[in-house]
Image: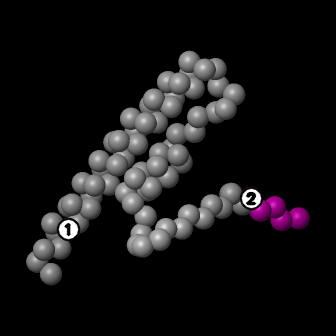
Amino acid sequence: MVSIMVAPVGVATSSDGGHSLEFFAERIVARLIHVGDQAPPPIRDQAIAFRKQMFEVVLAGLKSAIESDRANRKGF
């Protein structure tokens, strides 16, 4: 017998171009930090606050990466 585990699949579409950096930052943070529905309220609140802080960190990192990539391509 062969058993295959398949992760849930999500699809997100956009109109008028690609997704925003905020979209990607939110997706990254959601994959890294899960806040359980059954967590006690103080722990859940702390985890949500941490996730918001990490969103800002990831977003800043994505912006820096894009700026760096664009700076490296000026000679082309």
Colour basis: one colour
Vertical side of 39 occupied by 6: above or below: below
Image spot of residue 6 (x, y percent): 72, 60
Residue under the image location 67 percent in, 32 percent down: 37
**Left or right of 41, for residue 15:** left
Image spot of residue 4 (x, y percent): 77, 62
Residues drawn in magenta:
1-5
Kind of residue indicated by mark 1? Arg
Q: Name which of mark 1 and mark 2 comes first in the sequence.
A: 2
Return the residue nearer the eye: 59 or 73.
59
Q: Quadrant of the C terminus?
A: bottom left
Q: How many marks?
A: 2
Name the image quarter holding residue 43.
top right
Chief SS of the magenta region: loop
Residue under the image location 28 percent in, 55 percent down: 63
Identity of the residue furthest to the front in this view: 16
Return the residue nearer the eye: 65 or 25.
25
Identity of the residue furthest to the left in this view: 75
Q: Secondary structure at mark 2?
A: loop
Q: How many C-alpha atoms fall within 10 Å of the one at disc 2: few (<14), some, or many (≥20)?
A: few
Image spot of residue 52 (x, y percent): 43, 36
Reply yes or no: does residue 39 show up in magenta: no
**Left or right of 47, for residue 39:** right
Vertical side of 69 occupied by 49: above or below: above
**Left or right of 60, for residue 3:** right
Vertical side of 40 occupied by 1: above or below: below
Identity of the residue furthest to the right in this view: 1
Q: How many C-alpha atoms fall within 10 Å of the one at disc 1: few (<14), some, or many (≥20)?
A: few
Q: Which residue is mark 1?
A: 70
Q: Which residue is mark 2?
A: 5
